[in-house]
Amino acid sequence: MPLQIEINSFSYKKSGIPVDVSGNGGGFVFDCRFIFNPGRMDEYKSLTGKDSEVIQFLDSQKTMSEFLESVYKLITPAIKNYIERNFTHLMINFGCTGGQHRSVYSAEMTKKFIIKNFPDVTVTVNHREFPHLNI
């Protein structure tokens, strides 16, 4: 069975850190709240981290790109190790204040990174505060 990577975005205020139901007891949890929140700007309030305007804004933020590079450096050896050891589940979580902009964007970018670098794993993304985005 190939490694299944579950990526979650969530709100610290609304739902808290996701529970790992796989029986492994957890995974990575990354806090995006230190990155400037585009939700504080009127033009982005009703949008999410999957909307092109928010993506462009967060793509332009040096703090966001540095954060994601750090995330990738942490998860890469774990994914390699899990594959080598035939593990079947890894959970990666991104939280922010509302679970709408930064965490959604981070989850989506991490999915792209994993698919590009580890094509044999299965990746699912769950946006806990915005389940309609789980397409």
Image: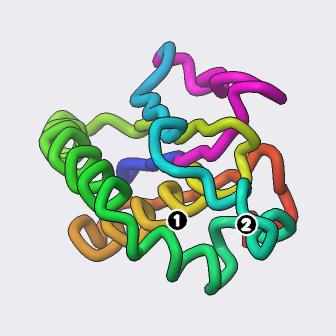
Q: Quadrant of the C terminus?
A: bottom right
Q: Report the Cα–Cα distance between label 2 and label 1.
A: 11 Å
Give the mark nearest the N terminus, 2 or 1.
2
Taking the magenta stretch, the answer to whether it contains residue 10 is yes
Give the number of the mark in front: 2 or 1.
2
What secondary structure is the magenta-colored segment mainly? loop
Q: Are marks 2 and 1 in contact (CB under 8 Å)?
A: no
Residue 54 picture quarter: bottom right
Q: Which span is picked out in magenta?
A: 7-24
Residue occupying image coordinates x 77% and y 25%: 13
Classify mark 2: residues with Cα within 10 Å, few (<14), some (14-19) or many (20+): many
Amino acid at dot 1: Glu
Find disc 2 in the rendering and name its residue: 48
Residue 48 picture quarter: bottom right
**Relative height, residue 133 to residue 99 (above, below):** below
Classify mark 1: residues with Cα within 10 Å, few (<14), some (14-19) or many (20+): many
Taking the magenta stretch, the answer to whether it contains residue 134 is no
- The location of residue 134, given as percent across then percent down, is 74, 64
- The location of residue 129, given as percent across then percent down, is 82, 46
**Relative height, residue 59 to residue 10 (above, below):** below
**Relative height, residue 29 to residue 113 (above, below):** above
Report if residue 81 is visible in the image.
Answer: yes
In the rendered view, does 128 fall on the left or right side of 53?
Answer: right
Find disc 1 in the rendering and name its residue: 108
